[in-house]
Image (cartoon, coloured by chain):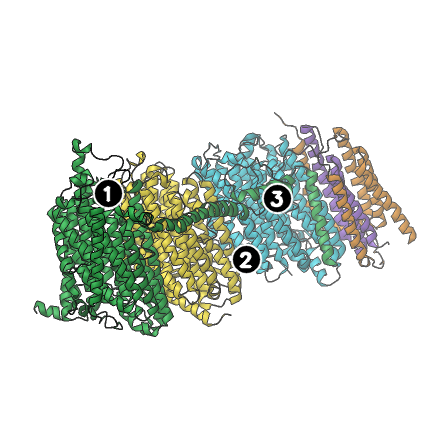
Chain colours: A cyan, B orange, C green, D purple, E yellow
């Protein structure tokens, strides 16, 4: 590999390369920033993200492979890159004040955040199971640390440990699954796997089992039932700013892998796998939404909500083997991810605004009377809740609309019915939050820190505006195609 | 053939026994030591399977570095035995049952699909699995993963520091 | 062009909307400006409104003499939907104008009377402000009644039909805070409205049937409900349909004209001020049913089955009500049952096809029954004035029986009034004789014509009516004797005062009409017959109308009438006098009670029909609606089914699986989706034990299931 | 060479024992070691298949798995040490304050 | 007429201007906020009147259509597609009329969080009008669901003691129905390739067997909204707890969204299924009529009584619509208007007394007419209108409905016959209410000091009364407006019937 080759290959992953370089640099620069001024690290990190985001946007629409087919940068990966980078920005905005308030402000926070984003971006670029695996670890390891960032708070440490142990456990299944796939096809490259299935030299049962185990691993990452159980504990225990990032970034990363692997390598296995995904999706939607009803802690509630939403996105994956609709499968899932990301960040912003030190201010009852005292905050939260339910004119509705369309088009009306039914159940607990904010009296206390408020307001506006002017985002999602063969 | 089989069976027995030993030992140190035995056995398998570099790496990285680290931490914490509280008694029998089910499932699959695994021995290319080949692969087609690994280790380092660095109050 | 030309050319027909407009204008004036008017102006406006309507009616009548076939006058399109076209259209013909004349004429007289009557009444009842409201209602009634009689189609007629019902409701409950328990009047009004609604239900069904079966035959396929079209098309429609239509219409008639089985509202309707009873519940509104059947003669004549039913209903009602009237003590209740009975006569007549006889009775009855009611009003006010005087004279007051509230309408509290209220007495006697059917008063001729028809057409009805006629004479005699003769039976009666001229003059006019009204259709002249022939006989089969005066019938009925009066005299002059001599504990309030005892009680209690309806219809419905509302809708449907089962369909599952658990975490609000799902949620969240090994187990389970599933799939 | 399923069978057995370790042991370190055993089992399968397909890919993969495992161990042990400082225990059953 | 200054666009979105202005007002400036809301909604009414002048009577098709692509959804085009025809224009007018009146009625009744209230109220108007004029299924669905939200807040924030429960129930019930409709809409989009209502109707290419299921899915949404028996359970809760203005709009307009949906979608797009299911729907409608009437009679709370009466009245509407002939459908549509006017007025009236006495238990009243003569008179007129007295609006609607149902070739005349009995029952419960409130002696001390209604309150009622009389005496203009469109609908149905379904 000549230098020229190397440069060309680096060019393929330019946004990622830039971000990795920036992160390493930030690690060093951070040493020079005195304690108490770590805001500058945040700013720097944001600049890095923006830089990478700029490149991604500029590159959107191109499609090439690189590093001997290890990575593939296409519409799909750029779209997800943008989403990850955007999540990173939002996460920084949320963390900026939060870390100070909680007394855990350290420069490494931003560095780790950036590395985790690198992992996510790598995930979206991956075209080889090796890269997938590495990306998974690169994504996860910083998150394990971030989850425990509020140490020595026991909850934070517990969250971290649970996340770590479960992550490692699930990682074991992924690895074994990859082993089986390798055993079945003799390759770990997705393109080659696809080709080998075609050429009939494959041990299909083995491959299917391998795919099943991969599903377990990434099901864990996206928090699908029954691999979801870490989610509420980890979401609750982690610092809220981390949780916000985790609930969007990690999930999106998991879906990036699932979509990439299943759509580009395993369409032939869909007859066997569809039913499994169907069931997981249905269980996830149901369980997530039902158990959320019983929650009184807002973070746990949002955790279950995030589980439920994983179920919705999984719905899009169900008809992935149907060539007539798998284009929509990706677009719908991506669109929903965006919708979910916007809404979720907004909701977490409100949570963060109300959170007090030592984990106070997280009970639902602490939200009573919010509408009277902080009308804008409450209004934003109401918008997010409605978006989570899927009430127009919020982007959550658009996302569901697109999803259900894909599912019905794929011929899974039953699943769509479960989807709408569970979103009805979900209305119950989302509305409860609105009820508490608007219809109960109380004396809530919220921080009026700029970036948190800004995030909440901006997300609320985006949630509505991107519905009414949905065309650009829809276009983007529909152009987020995978380079297929 | 039979020699190979015999060797395999003996090694397999050792591997399984040591794994079970790790599972059953009350004392965490014993567990760690059983695991060392297990890893070493597996390294032998690697050698048998024409993967000398991996076998060496297994012994040095796993058996050597990682397991020592484990033992070190166990000693450091002095937490070789868990307390007597058993909160979820039902978990153990259920887990064992499930594990047996999993094994049965796996056994069934392997048994029914065994023909797919018996390909006639082909001539192994020269130097298969040698450090040279591994090195070449790592720096050509596997360049990116290799580099990512470095980042990963960096992150792990930072992480470990962040997690353990003392708080200045 | 002179007036007579205009009349002959039928130009005056175009005035017909004004029979409606004048009263409407009157009521609008009184609503809008009445606040600033005194009673005199309000009264004048109202009387003028009614009077002008009458003038228009007269003009129309005169015009009809020139063009007796009349005309229909479409005024405004009301509803047009596809094949349905309903117009505000007026009908000028001899029948409608007859009704207009009655309504306008009697109406105006009663208006005038009411100005005097209500002046005292509002003061007696303690709310002078309601004077205006009364006349607004009254004008509204005239308007509605005019709509009813001048309509050219069934649906416009129905507007008037329900409109008069509304006015009836409003006027019955005029003193809505009075009556039994303070709510009696309001309840009476409600009863009237609802019972009428039952009748209206019949009317509506008849209209629907008409539309369904007549519309396809209608010219251009557009059905207008107008009388002429219906009459023309009727022969082409299956007789069974006509039977259904006419029977449902009969249900409407029994409601409005207080026939069996829906007559129950009319006696209660006496709760309204007396002019109301006179105008609405005697002279005009209640005869609407008779008018309706006459209007629909083309239908009824086609189906003898229905005709028979109508006649039987009329005949039985006539007798039934007459018997009840015998045992009533309230001066107005007697007249009310008498009205029902007389309406029975009319219905029987039109049922037999004797439309002219029915209409004749309608007209004369309007005169004398209005007279009777108004006179009764005069009596009541006279007694009230007496009461007032007694109240203000301490010496007299002591002699008042104070055990119970004094009822100025109870005939047992009257007696000897002929000296106190001379004019009233004389006009009352004229009215009573007319009603009793004594030659040569109006009632005699009309009733005789009906009886004569019945004798040839329907013997059963004839006998029913004949016996009813006897009772009629008897109870009128009883009333006159109880009220005007003998000794005053209470202090107020002893101090009763005659009414003012504004009250007595209308009475005298009506008395005059009652005297001479019979000449409208005097045998061998048959003025009314000829007059109505233009409208009615032109289509009717013609049988019966030609029956001439029957001397035998006339003599029999006269003998019975006189007999009734004599019997009344015997009982209430002779026996009553004897009774006064008995010790008070043996004294009966009515001589007849001592003779027929239990039967009298039965009659006094009106055969307990109200109670019967109460137990069979009202109570069950109240129970049903309470049951539906409380048990079915709320407890079962709302709380149980919707809130528990439907929303929480998993309730049962979780309960059976885990037994009921108490969930302390969730507060009590919005428990509806809850219970079920919340319990499920609570169960499921228990899985989330916090033990990381459990979580691993869950993942492991997932793996095993996936592999298991794939094994099955891949086999 | 023996048929590859011999090795895969062994790998599965080891993997299951590893998984079982996670499920039934309460000592966080032992659980973590069990995870390592699972990874090791996967490695065995990889190498066996690499031999079977005569492809270096499998061996390279094992190399990466080992590296990752090392990274994980660094984080994992650091975490365990940290939590031990706070809680003075590494019994995972006692680390269960977050639940529901 | 361009996109923005198009009369329909203006009618739908003008209240948003009010919302924007109110957003910039301080919450303490209660009166200015009220005035802005009132002006905005009145202006909307004015605009809708202007819109009406553009409306060509006699044209059966969509008018003032505006059809601009909004966005592409994969291969679907979602359009900003608005239009009115005879079926919807009157309902738009009803909405724009009732909104300012409701706002006027809250002048003194709502003192808490006036700003939020007015914002939600104006947003509600946007949603409701939007539902009536949108001709794109997607757009329709957006407005449909959106109209839920402000109402949810209005009930939940300004309602009675159990308001949260009622609000939640209202939301969840209506949403439960509409999610099925969403699936049906998606199905249509997938299999018919368009969301344009007009196009779908004109094509008429939905197979009869599928129509059945689509019909049911749409009907689920609409039937809950109407609400048809037995899905009415949310209604009494919502009405009893909602503030007066909320009830007025809820009964006056929101319920009409359901019946309108039946006309616009179920009858027009799935005529075959409509014919097949007509007897079933009519049966439920009749049960609703009788059941609602019976249950009303047993109520002790005046508002609850009126709420249940809606079940009965809407039963008439449904019966009319599923008579599937001109009389029935026109009657049904007119009855929607009538119910909006009469029941809206009834809720206003009950609200007025509630504002004075803070109770609606009918036993707490009696003899009010004596001290509140104007109030009593107005109540009487409205009551009579509600029970269908000829000469007032209710009768015209009910009569034409029953006539249509009786003459319908799709449903048995027995339905109409039984429904006609509902007219008797209506008189019973309405007169009962009137009697309990106004008649009888004025024997409660706390009632003796009540003041008659003031000019503002009269002003809120007068427009309704004008229409009550107008429709009662001269309904022709209303029928003329809807006539051609209904004619077209009827011909669609009869074509479907003629095409022969088994």
Crowding at dot 1, Cα within 10 Å, few <14 / some 14-19 / many 20+, comes out as: some
Which residue does the image show at 21% across and 35% down from the upper left? C400
Q: Relative to A443, is E372 above or below?
A: below
Q: Position of residue E380 (x, y in %)?
A: 29, 48
Secondary element at tag 3: helix
| Residue position for label 2 | A405
- Given contact means CB atoms under 8 Å apart, are the residues at marks 3 and 2 in contact? no
The tag earlier along the polypeptide, 1 or 3, is: 1
| Residue position for label 3 | C654
Q: Residue furthest right?
A: B3
Secondary element at tag 2: helix
Q: Position of residue E354 (x, y in %)?
A: 35, 40
- Given contact means CB atoms under 8 Å apart, are the residues at marks 1 and 3 in contact? no
Instruction: Tell me the CA gap for discs 3 and 2.
Output: 33 Å
Among the 4 quarters of the image, the one containing residue C92: bottom left
- Disc 1 versus disc 3: nearer the observer: 1
Q: Chain of mark 2?
A: A
Question: Do the residues indicated by labels 1 and 2 lie within the same chain of the protein?
Answer: no
| Residue position for label 1 | C579
- Disc 3 versus disc 2: nearer the observer: 3
Q: Can you say which quadrant of the picture contains the C terminus of chain A?
A: bottom right
- For residue A407, say whether it is visible: yes
Between residues C345 and C31, which one lies in front from this camera angle? Answer: C345
Q: Is residue C533 left or right of residue E450?
A: left
Q: Chain of mark 1?
A: C
């Amino acid at each position: 590999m000549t230098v020229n080759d190397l440069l060309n290959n680096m060019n393929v992953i330019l946004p990622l390369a830039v971000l990795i370089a920036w992160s390493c640099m930030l690690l060093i620069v951070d040493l020079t920033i005195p304690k108490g001024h770590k805001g500058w690290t945040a700013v720097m990190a944001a600049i890095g993200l923006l830089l990478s985001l700029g490149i991604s946007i500029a590159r959107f629409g191109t499609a090439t492979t690189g590093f001997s087919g290890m990575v593939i940068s296409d519409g799909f990966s750029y779209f997800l890159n943008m989403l990850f980078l955007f999540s990173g920005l939002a996460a920084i905005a949320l963390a900026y004040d939060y870390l100070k308030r909680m007394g855990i402000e350290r420069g490494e926070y931003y560095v780790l955040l950036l590395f985790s984003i690198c992992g996510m971006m790598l995930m979206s670029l991956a075209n080889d199971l090796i890269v997938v695996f590495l990306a998974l670890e690169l994504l996860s390891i910083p998150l394990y640390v971030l989850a425990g960032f509020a140490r020595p708070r026991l909850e934070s440490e517990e969250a971290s440990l649970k996340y770590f142990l479960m992550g490692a456990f699930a990682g074991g299944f992924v690895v074994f699954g990859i082993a089986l796939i390798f055993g079945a096809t003799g390759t770990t490259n997705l393109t080659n796997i696809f080709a080998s299935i075609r050429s009939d030299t494959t041990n299909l049962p083995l491959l299917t089992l391998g795919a099943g185990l991969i599903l377990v691993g990434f099901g864990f990452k996206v928090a699908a039932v029954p691999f979801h159980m870490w989610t509420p504990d980890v979401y609750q225990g982690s610092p809220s700013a981390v949780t916000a990032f985790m609930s969007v970034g990690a999930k999106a990363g998991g879906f990036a892998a699932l979509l990439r692997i299943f759509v580009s390598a395993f369409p032939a296995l869909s007859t066997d796998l569809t039913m499994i995904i169907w069931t997981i999706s249905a269980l996830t939607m149901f369980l997530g939404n039902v158990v959320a009803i019983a929650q009184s802690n807002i973070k746990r509630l949002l955790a279950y909500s995030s589980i439920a939403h994983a179920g919705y996105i999984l719905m899009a994956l169900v008809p992935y083997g149907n060539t007539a609709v798998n284009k929509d499968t990706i677009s719908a899932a991506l669109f929903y991810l965006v919708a979910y990301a916007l809404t979720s960040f907004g909701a977490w912003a409100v949570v963060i605004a109300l959170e007090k030190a030592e984990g106070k201010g997280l009970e639902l009852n602490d939200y009573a009377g919010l509408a009277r005292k902080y009308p804008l905050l409450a209004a934003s939260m109401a918008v997010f809740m409605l978006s989570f339910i899927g009430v127009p004119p919020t982007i959550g509705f658009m996302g569901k609309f697109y999803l259900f369309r894909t599912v019905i088009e794929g011929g899974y009306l039953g699943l769509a019915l479960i989807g709408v039914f569970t979103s009805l159940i979900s209305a119950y607990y989302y509305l409860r939050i609105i009820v508490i904010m608007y219809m109960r009296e109380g004396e809530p206390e919220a921080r009026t820190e700029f970036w948190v408020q800004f995030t909440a307001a901006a997300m609320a506006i985006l949630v509505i505006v991107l519905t009414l002017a949905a065309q650009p985002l829809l276009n983007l999602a529909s152009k987020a195609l995978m380079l297929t063969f | 053939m039979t020699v190979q089989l015999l060797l395999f069976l003996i090694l397999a027995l050792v591997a399984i026994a040591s794994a079970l030993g790790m599972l059953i030992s009350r004392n965490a140190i014993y567990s760690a030591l059983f695991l060392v035995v297990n890893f070493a056995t597996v390294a032998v398998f690697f050698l048998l399977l024409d993967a000398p570099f991996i076998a060496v790496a297994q012994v040095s990285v796993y058996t050597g570095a990682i397991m020592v680290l484990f033992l070190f931490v166990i000693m450091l914490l002095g937490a070789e035995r868990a307390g007597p509280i058993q909160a979820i008694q039902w978990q153990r029998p259920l887990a064992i049952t499930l594990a047996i089910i999993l094994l049965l499932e796996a056994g069934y699959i392997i048994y029914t699909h065994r023909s797919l695994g018996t390909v006639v021995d082909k001539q192994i290319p020269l130097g298969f699995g040698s450090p040279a080949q591994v090195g070449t692969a790592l720096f050509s087609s596997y360049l990116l993963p290799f580099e990512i690994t470095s980042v990963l280790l960096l992150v792990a380092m930072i992480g470990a520091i962040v997690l353990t660095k003392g708080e200045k109050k | 062009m002179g007036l007579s030309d205009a009349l002959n050319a039928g130009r005056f027909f175009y005035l017909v909307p004004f029979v409606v407009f004048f009263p409407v204008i009157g009521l609008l004036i009184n609503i809008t400006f009445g606040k600033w008017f005194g009673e005199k102006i309000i009264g004048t406006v109202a009387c003028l409104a009614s009077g002008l309507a009458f003038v228009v009616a007269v003009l129309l009548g005169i015009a009809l003499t020139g063009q007796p076939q009349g005309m229909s006058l479409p005024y405004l399109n009301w509803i047009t939907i596809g094949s349905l076209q309903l117009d505000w259209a007026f009908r000028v013909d001899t029948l409608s104008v007859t009704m207009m004349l009655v309504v306008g004429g009697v109406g105006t007289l009663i208006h005038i009377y009411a100005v005097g009557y209500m002046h005292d009444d509002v003061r007696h009842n303690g709310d002078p402000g309601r004077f205006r409201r009364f006349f607004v209602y009254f004008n509204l009634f005239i308007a509605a009644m005019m709509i009813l009689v001048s309509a050219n189609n069934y649906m416009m007629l129905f507007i008037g039909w329900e409109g008069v019902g509304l006015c009836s409701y409003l006027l019955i409950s005029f003193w809505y805070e009075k009556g039994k328990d303070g709510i009696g009047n309001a309840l009476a009004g409600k009863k009237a409205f609802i019972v009428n609604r039952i009748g209206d239900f019949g009317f509506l069904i008849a209209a629907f049937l008409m539309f369904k079966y007549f519309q396809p035959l209608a010219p251009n396929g557009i059905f207008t409900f107008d009388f002429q079209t219906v009459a023309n098309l009727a022969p082409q429609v299956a007789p069974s349909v006509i039977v259904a239509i006419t029977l449902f219409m009969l249900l409407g008639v029994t409601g409005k004209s207080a026939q069996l089985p829906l007559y129950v509202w009319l006696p209660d309707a006496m709760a309204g001020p007396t002019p109301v009873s006179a105008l609405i519940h005697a002279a005009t509104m209640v005869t609407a049913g008779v008018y309706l059947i006459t209007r629909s003669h083309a239908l009824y004549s086609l189906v003898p089955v229905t005709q028979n039913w109508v006649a039987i209903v009329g005949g039985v009602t006539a007798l039934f009500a007459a018997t009840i009237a015998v045992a009533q003590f309230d001066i107005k209740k007697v007249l009310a049952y008498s009205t029902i009975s007389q309406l029975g006569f009319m219905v029987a007549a039109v049922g037999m096809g004797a439309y002219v006889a029915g209409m004749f009775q309608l007209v004369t009855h309007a005169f004398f029954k209005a007279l009777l009611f108004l006179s009764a009003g005069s009596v009541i006010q006279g007694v009230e004035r007496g009461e007032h005087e007694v109240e203000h004279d301490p010496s007299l007051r002591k002699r008042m029986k104070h055990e119970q509230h004094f009822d100025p309408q109870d005939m047992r509290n009257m007696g000897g009034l002929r000296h106190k209220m001379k004019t009233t007495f004389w006009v009352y006697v004229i009215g009573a004789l007319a009603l009793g059917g004594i030659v040569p008063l109006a009632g005699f001729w009309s009733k005789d014509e009906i009886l004569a028809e019945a004798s040839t057409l329907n013997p059963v009805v004839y006998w029913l009516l004949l016996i009813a006629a006897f009772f009629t004479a008897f109870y009128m005699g009883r009333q006159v004797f109880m009220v005007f003769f003998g000794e005053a039976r209470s202090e107020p009666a002893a101090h009763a005062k005659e009414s003012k001229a504004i009250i007595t003059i209308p009475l005298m006019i009506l008395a005059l009409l009652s005297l001479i009204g019979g000449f409208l259709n005097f045998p061998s002249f048959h003025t009314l017959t000829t007059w109505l022939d233009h409208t009615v006989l032109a289509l009717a089969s013609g049988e019966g109308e030609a029956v001439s005066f029957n001397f035998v019938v006339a003599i029999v009925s006269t003998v019975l009438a006189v007999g009734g009066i004599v019997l009344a005299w015997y009982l209430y002059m002779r026996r009553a006098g004897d009774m006064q001599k008995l010790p008070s504990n043996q004294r009966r309030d009515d001589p007849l009670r001592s003779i027929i005892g239990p039967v009298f009680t039965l009659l006094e209690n009106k055969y307990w029909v109200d109670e019967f309806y109460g137990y069979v219809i009202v109570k069950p419905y109240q129970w049903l609606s309470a049951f539906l509302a409380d048990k079915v809708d709320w407890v079962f449907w709302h709380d149980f089914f919707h809130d528990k089962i439907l929303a929480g369909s998993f309730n049962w599952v979780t309960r059976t699986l885990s037994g009921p658990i108490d969930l302390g975490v969730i507060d009590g609000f919005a428990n509806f989706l809850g219970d079920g799902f919340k319990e499920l949620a609570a169960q499921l969240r228990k899985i989330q034990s916090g033990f990381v090994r459990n979580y691993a187990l869950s993942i492991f389970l997932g793996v095993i299931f996936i592999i298991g599933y794939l094994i099955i799939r891949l086999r | 060479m023996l048929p590859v399923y011999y090795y895969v069978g062994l790998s599965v057995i080891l993997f299951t024992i590893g998984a079982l370790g996670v499920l039934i042991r309460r000592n966080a370190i032992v659980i973590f070691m069990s995870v390592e055993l699972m990874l090791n089992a996967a490695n065995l399968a990889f190498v066996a298949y690499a031999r079977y397909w005569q492809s270096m890919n499998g061996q390279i993969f094992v190399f990466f798995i080992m590296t990752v495992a090392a990274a994980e161990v660094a984080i994992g042990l650091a975490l365990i040490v940290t939590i031990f400082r706070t809680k003075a225990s590494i019994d995972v059953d006692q680390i269960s304050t977050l639940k529901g | 007429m361009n996109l923005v200054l198009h009369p329909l666009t203006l009618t739908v979105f003008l209240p948003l201007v009010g919302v924007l202005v109110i957003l910039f007002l301080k919450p303490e400036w209660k009166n200015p906020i009220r005035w802005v809301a009132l002006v905005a909604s009145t202006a909307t009414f004015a605009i809708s009147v202007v819109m009406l002048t553009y409306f060509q009577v006699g044209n059966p098709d969509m008018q003032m259509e505006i059809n601009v692509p909004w966005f592409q959804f994969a291969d679907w085009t979602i359009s900003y597609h608005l239009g009115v025809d005879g079926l919807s224009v009157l309902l738009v007018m009803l909405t724009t009329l009732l909104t300012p009146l409701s706002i006027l009625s809250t002048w003194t009744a709502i003192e808490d969080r006036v700003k939020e209230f007015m914002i939600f109220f104006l947003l509600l108007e946007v949603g409701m009008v939007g539902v009536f004029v949108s001709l794109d299924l997607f757009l329709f669905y957006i407005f449909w669901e959106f109209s839920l939200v402000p109402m949810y807040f209005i009930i939940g924030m300004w309602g009675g003691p159990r308001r949260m429960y009622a609000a939640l129930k209202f939301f969840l019930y209506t949403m439960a129905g509409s999610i099925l409709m969403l699936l049906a809409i998606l199905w249509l989009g997938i299999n018919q390739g368009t969301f344009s209502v007009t196009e779908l109707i004109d094509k008429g290419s939905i197979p009869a067997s599928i129509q059945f299921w689509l019909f049911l899915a749409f009907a689920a949404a609409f039937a809950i909204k109407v609400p048809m028996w037995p899905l009415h359970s949310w209604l009494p809760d919502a009405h009893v707890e909602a503030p007066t203005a909320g009830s007025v709009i809820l009964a006056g307009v929101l319920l009409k969204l359901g019946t309108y949906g039946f006309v616009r979608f179920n009858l027009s797009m799935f005529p075959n299924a409509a014919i097949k299911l007509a007897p079933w729907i009519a049966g439920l409608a009749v049960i609703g009529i009788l059941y609602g009437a019976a249950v009303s009679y047993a109520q002790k709370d005046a508002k609850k009584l009126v709420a249940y009466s809606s079940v009965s009245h809407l039963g008439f509407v449904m019966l009319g619509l599923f008579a599937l002939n001109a009389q029935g459908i026109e009657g049904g549509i007119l009855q929607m208007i009538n119910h909006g006017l009469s029941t809206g007025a009834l809720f206003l009236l009950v609200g007025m007394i509630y504002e004075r006495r803070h109770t609606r238990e009918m036993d707490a009243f009696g003899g009010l007419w004596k001290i509140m003569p104007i109030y009593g008179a107005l109540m009487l007129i409205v009551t009579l209108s509600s029970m269908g007295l000829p000469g007032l609006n209710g009768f015209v609607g009910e009569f034409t409905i029953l006539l249509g149902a009786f003459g319908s070739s799709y449903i048995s005349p027995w339905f109409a016959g039984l429904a006609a009995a509902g007219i008797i029952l209506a008189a019973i419960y309405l007169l009962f209410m009137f009697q309990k409130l106004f008649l009888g002696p004025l024997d409660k001390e706390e009632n003796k000091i009540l003041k008659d209604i003031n000019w503002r309150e009269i002003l809120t009622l007068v427009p309704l009364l004008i229409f009550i009389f107008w429709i009662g005496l001269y309904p022709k203009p209303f029928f003329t407006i809807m006539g051609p469109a209904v004619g077209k609908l009827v011909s669609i149905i009869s074509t479907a019937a003629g095409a022969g379904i088994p």
